[in-house]
């Protein structure tokens, strides 16, 4: 176990390195729509709660939330994504402009903009309603995306946020193989994730991608090694919710980072936060271990909030300064 209080000073210095750092974010964007209200009775029509909606809010989801997390830490993301040609696309563009996130949104009249509507009653999510298109994009459209990426390339790393909506494909990843890709996966595309610098599946994705049911630490290790070998990865980070995260570094060293969260209310967007922090920290030249420590703090912050949340600089400083230094266990 590593537990060095002095590392806190290093992590705070690393936060300052993020200021003004540019990083490209590519992947499926979506609009998160929340209806907030109270529940006081059950419907007479069906055994379901009646939610009296008191307010509605909108926020960036998917790759948009990844970019927003980078921005909230002081970084400068450049977002490239695809939407439908509809009012929801216009709403996403407005949110990006409000966040001052540089972006290219490519509209497709053949697709719907992904919208996830969550109904929240008494701080608990009651139901989620999705509107989306998840069919594969044609080769010509993918070429247009790749052209825009290469025209605006920034630095050594690219973040790819795959939500399985059709943007990420073998053609897409092959065209970017000369860059260090940090990729948040979906099981739909697991077979095309090869030769990636860092893959960040959650426990369910790691189970499905490896065929190993995870019930113990040994299962995590077995699943991780299978994924690294079958996908020929340089590094792998499995996020485990309340159990923190496990880094398989250079296929040799395995490190466990227990969660820093005091309470877990909502894991919505936690994966977005992890990949955002990992990517922007790596872009500044930080080590994988340092990036994981910062990402673990950030994830602990967002799961303690209801709804899609971001880890901002001031909150990060407070959580890093509080208590002892981060714990790391070598497996």
Image (cartoon, rainbow, N blue to C red):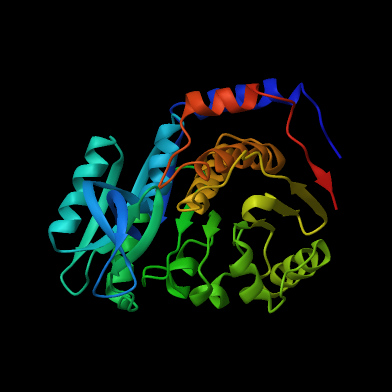
Name the residue located 63 percent from the left edge and 26 percent from the top edge.
320
Number of on-image labels: 0
User: Does residue 282 appear left or right of residue 47 in this picture?
Assistant: right
Which quadrant of the structure image shows residue 83? bottom left
User: Does residue 319 appear left or right of residue 159 in this picture?
Assistant: right
Answer yes or no: is residue 153 visible. no
Residue 60 is situated, as x and y percent measured from the top left of the image, at 32, 49
Residue 42 is situated, as x and y percent measured from the top left of the image, at 31, 64
Residue 312 is situated, as x and y percent measured from the top left of the image, at 46, 31
Look at the image and tell me in which quarter the N terminus lies: top right
Name the residue located 47 percent from the left edge and 42 percent from the top edge.
305
Name the residue located 82 percent from the left edge and 56 percent from the top edge.
252
Which quadrant of the structure image shows residue 89? bottom left
Name the residue located 13 percent from the left edge and 58 percent from the top edge.
87
Which quadrant of the structure image shows residue 27? bottom left
- In this view, 284 is above or below 80: above
Quick one: 42 or 15, which is closer to the camera?
A: 42
- In this view, 180 is above or below 189: above
User: Does residue 285 appear left or right of residue 43 in this picture?
Assistant: right
Residue 10 is situated, as x and y percent measured from the top left of the image, at 68, 24
Answer yes or no: is residue 77 visible. yes
Quick one: 69 or 122, which is closer to the camera?
A: 122
- In this view, 148 is above or below 297: below
């Amino acid at each position: 176990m590593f537990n060095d209080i002095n590392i806190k000073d290093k992590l705070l210095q690393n936060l300052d390195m993020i200021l003004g750092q540019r990083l490209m974010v590519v992947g499926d964007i979506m609009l998160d729509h929340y209806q907030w209200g109270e529940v006081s009775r059950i419907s007479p029509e069906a055994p379901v709660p009646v939610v009296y909606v008191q307010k509605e809010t909108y926020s960036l989801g998917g790759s948009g939330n990844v970019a927003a997390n980078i921005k909230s830490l002081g970084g400068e993301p450049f977002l490239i994504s695809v939407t439908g040609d509809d009012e929801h696309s216009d709403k996403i563009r407005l949110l990006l402009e409000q966040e001052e996130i540089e972006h290219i949104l490519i509209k497709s009249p053949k697709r719907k903009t992904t919208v996830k509507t969550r109904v929240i009653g008494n701080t608990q999510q009651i139901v989620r309603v999705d509107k989306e298109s998840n069919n594969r994009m044609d080769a010509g459209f993918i070429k247009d995306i790749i052209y825009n990426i290469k025209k605006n390339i920034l630095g050594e790393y690219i973040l790819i946020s795959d939500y399985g909506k059709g943007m990420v494909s073998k053609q897409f990843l092959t065209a970017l193989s000369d860059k260090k890709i940090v990729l948040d996966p979906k099981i739909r595309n697991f077979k095309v994730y090869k030769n990636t610098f860092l893959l960040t599946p959650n426990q369910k994705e790691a189970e499905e991608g490896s065929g190993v049911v995870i019930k113990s630490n040994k299962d995590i290790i077995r699943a991780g090694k299978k994924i690294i070998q079958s996908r020929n990865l340089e590094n792998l980070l499995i996020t485990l919710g309340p159990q923190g995260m496990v880094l398989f570094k250079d296929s040799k060293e395995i490190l466990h980072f227990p969660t820093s969260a005091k309470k877990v209310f909502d894991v919505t967007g936690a994966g977005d936060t992890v990949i955002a922090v990992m990517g922007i920290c790596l872009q500044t030249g930080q080590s994988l271990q340092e990036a994981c420590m910062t990402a673990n703090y950030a994830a602990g912050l967002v799961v303690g909030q209801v709804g899609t949340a971001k880890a901002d600089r001031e909150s990060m400083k407070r959580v890093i300064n509080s208590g002892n230094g981060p714990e790391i266990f070598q497996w």
